[in-house]
Image (cartoon, rainbow, N blue to C red):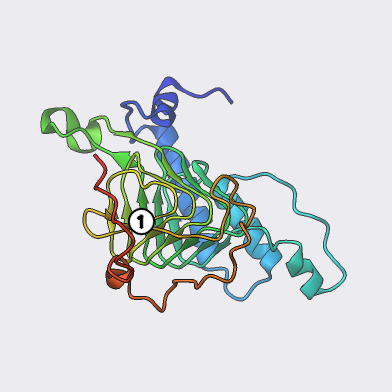
Amino acid sequence: MELSDNKRNMLRGELYHAFTPELVADRARCKHACTRYNNAGDVSRRKLTELFRDILRDETPLPPPAATPEEDDQLFEDDPWIEPPVNMDYGFNVKLGKNVFINFHAVFLDTCLISVGSRTLVGPNVSFFSGTHPLDPVIRQGTRGPELGKEIHIGEDCWIGGNVVILPGVNIGNGSVVGAGSVVTKDVPNFTVVAGNPAKIIRKIDTAMDTEDSTKWSGRSEEPIGGAEVPMADMGARDEAVQTLPETE
């Protein structure tokens, strides 16, 4: 079906009107799909995958059922795992990579594309806000005025802590970590820890991963791993030899 000019403007991040019959219907479809997923209860991984793909309007055919429930579950081991409840505006603007985990109470205001790279972990109560509004109230006009958005892109192998808010237009680089409770207003470089409101760079991540190709390891597996056992607030001061990067513009 051919897109209307208004919907095309929305997808491009230009001014558009959200309360047209077309977009109201799109949001209603997504809301009902989210409700079915959130209320699914104790169902198979296959059924959850089917319901979640319906939210995204992903028409990729499911593989034929396997011989046993355990083998059938393995067919979906690369599909993203989304703990309900989850809420989205449109669904079709959300793209998730392989082995993504998103904990409960995630919110995707997907006015524009929101992508999350493979193997990224997202804590509970994380909000992805790709939609925004004009600052001038004369233009904004409540539900009668136009709004707009900017794409959000989360790289591969990231860890987003709980209660994080990611604002329109933000890009988070591969392998980066966002501390719990942060509000991310600016781009985050690859393999960087940020935290705070607004989020600021704490340190670079010394990693055994090949930073040119995140699917490969550099062979430095004997190095200690700094993870959840290290309080986020202390990570910057843990190693005085590591120089904190300056805040980005």
216 sits to left or right of 173 = right
Identify the image quadrant of residue 6.
Answer: top left
Closest to the observer: 225 or 1? Answer: 225
Closest to the observer: 167 or 177? Answer: 177
Q: Residue at x 45, y 68 (%)?
A: 104
109 sits to left or right of 208 = left
Identify the image quadrant of residue 144.
Answer: top left
Q: Note whether 39 is above or below 140 in the view shown.
A: below
* Residue reaching furthest to the front: 241
Closest to the observer: 44 or 188? Answer: 188
Q: Residue at x 46, y 23 (%)?
A: 4
Residue tagged by mark 1? 127
Q: Residue at x 45, y 60 (%)?
A: 206
Question: In the image, residue 166 lies at what x, y percent?
Answer: 33, 51
Q: Residue at x 36, y 67 (%)?
A: 162
Closest to the observer: 224 or 138? Answer: 224
Name which residue type carries label 1. Ser
Question: In the image, residue 216 lies at what x, y percent?
Answer: 64, 53
